[in-house]
Image (cartoon, grey):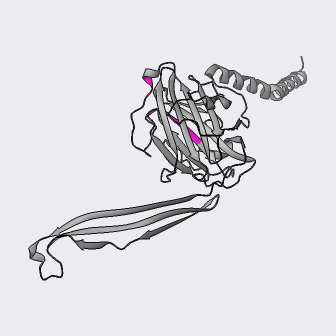
């Protein structure tokens, strides 16, 4: 074979590698994903339907109330950690109901070994990442950037927070726990795992639209002993529950009452003080005296994303009790 023919053959061989290498690399990537236990399935917009009921279901931490059966459960969670995109090792079901003034979530966290469920924390609003927990993320304004976070452990311990502009909030927790909302919840550890019921008034979400409601929504379950994080939507490792733009949607809520936030919290403080006889002549009266003060805190929703806070304080007073 001539030198020219040899060069031509070598050139054709190189061109063949360049032309077909993307396919070879793509096949290699898929094979590596399958070998590592990861899923190459694309993400998709997920939708959950809320079912209307005439009365609130029992919020006792169980789903024994027949009203819960009117809701279609969702269970298509996927792992974010430790095996991205794989089915969860434990099944989770969520049901959504609503009345004119509140939305309700019934959660079943199945567990193949309920005795190993981790639940120790009883303090509200502290980090729950050392326990099992379930998290609800609600983007009530559907702006795909901001959301409310509601967490509950198998002991019923609550944590609530705000996610702003998809900010993680730092550490292992979603959102800033400085926000406190008005909501109720209960949880029970059972022979099948643990269950929880959650009620959130529309006013807590400062939600004012009343018909054809669409929320951004997501759910997360954390299994402590396995360090497993299961998400309903946005399960990619680069996303997570704080990425509101990757949340699913809640449909079906309509014809509800005003959700304008209006919270009044009056408070009062009482105390006593004792001054010795040595203060005589200094302008103070020796003996026992009572101390008292009070005030009112108010939160008023102006728009879905704007809340006015007002505080009225009474100047502390003193009343002589004895001389």
Instruction: Specify whether residue 11 is painted magenta.
Output: no
Q: Nearer the viewer, residue 51 or 170?
A: 51
Residue 88, quarter of picture: top right
In this picture, residue 32 sits left or right of residue 151? right
Q: Nearer the viewer, residue 49 or 255?
A: 255
Q: How many marks?
A: 0
> Residue 78 at x, y = what percent?
63, 29
What residue is rendered at 58% in x and 58% in y? 261
Q: Nearer the viewer, residue 187 or 158?
A: 187
What residue is rendered at 43% in x and 21% in y? 115
In the depicted structure, whether residue 107 falls above or below residue 257: above
- Judged from this view, the residue extending furthest toward the left is 278
**Residue 84 visible here:** no
**Residue 118 visible here:** yes
Quadrant position of the N terminus in the picture: top right
In the depicted structure, whether residue 167 falls above or below residue 87: below
What residue is rendered at 65% in x and 58% in y? 304
Please state the extent of the stretch shown in magenta in the rendering: 116-136
Q: Main secondary structure of the magenta part?
A: loop
Residue 20, quarter of picture: top right
> Residue 37 at x, y = what percent?
62, 22
In this picture, residue 313 sits left or right of residue 310? left
Quadrant position of the C terminus in the picture: bottom left
What residue is rendered at 57% in x and 63% in y? 300
> Residue 38 at x, y = what percent?
64, 25
> Residue 245 at x, y = what percent?
68, 46
In the depicted structure, whether residue 78 falls above or below residue 121: above
Residue 49, quarter of picture: top right
In this picture, residue 6 sits left or right of residue 69? right
């Amino acid at each position: 074979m001539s030198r020219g023919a040899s060069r031509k053959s070598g050139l054709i061989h190189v061109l063949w590698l360049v032309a077909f290498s993307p396919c070879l690399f793509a096949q290699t990537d898929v094979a590596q994903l399958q070998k590592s236990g990861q899923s190459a399935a694309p993400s998709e917009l997920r939708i959950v339907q809320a079912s209307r009921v005439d009365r609130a279901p029992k919020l006792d931490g169980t789903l024994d109330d027949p009203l819960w059966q009117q809701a279609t459960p969702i269970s298509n969670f996927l792992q974010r950690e430790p095996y991205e995109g794989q089915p969860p090792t434990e099944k989770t079901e969520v049901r959504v109901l609503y009345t004119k003034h509140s939305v309700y979530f019934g959660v079943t966290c199945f567990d193949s070994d309920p005795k190993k469920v981790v639940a120790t924390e009883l303090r509200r609003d502290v980090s729950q990442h050392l326990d099992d927990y379930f998290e609800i993320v609600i983007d009530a304004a559907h702006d795909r950037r901001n959301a409310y976070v509601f967490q509950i452990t198998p002991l019923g311990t609550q944590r609530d927070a705000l996610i702003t502009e998809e900010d993680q909030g730092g550490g292992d927790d979603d959102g800033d726990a400085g926000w406190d909302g008005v909501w109720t919840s209960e949880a029970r550890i059972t022979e099948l795992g643990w269950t929880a019921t959650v009620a959130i008034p529309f006013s807590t979400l400062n939600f004012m639209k009343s018909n054809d409601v669409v929320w951004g929504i997501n759910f997360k379950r954390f299994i402590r002993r396995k360090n497993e994080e299961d998400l309903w939507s946005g399960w990619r490792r680069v996303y997570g529950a704080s990425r509101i733009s990757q949340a699913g949607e809640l449909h079906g809520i309509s014809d509800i009452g005003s959700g304008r936030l209006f919270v009044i919290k009056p408070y009062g403080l009482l105390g006593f003080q004792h001054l010795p006889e040595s203060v005589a002549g200094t302008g103070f009266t020796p003996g026992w005296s009572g101390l008292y003060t009070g005030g009112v805190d108010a939160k008023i929703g102006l728009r879905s994303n704007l809340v006015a806070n007002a505080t009225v304080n009474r100047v502390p007073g003193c009343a002589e009790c004895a001389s």
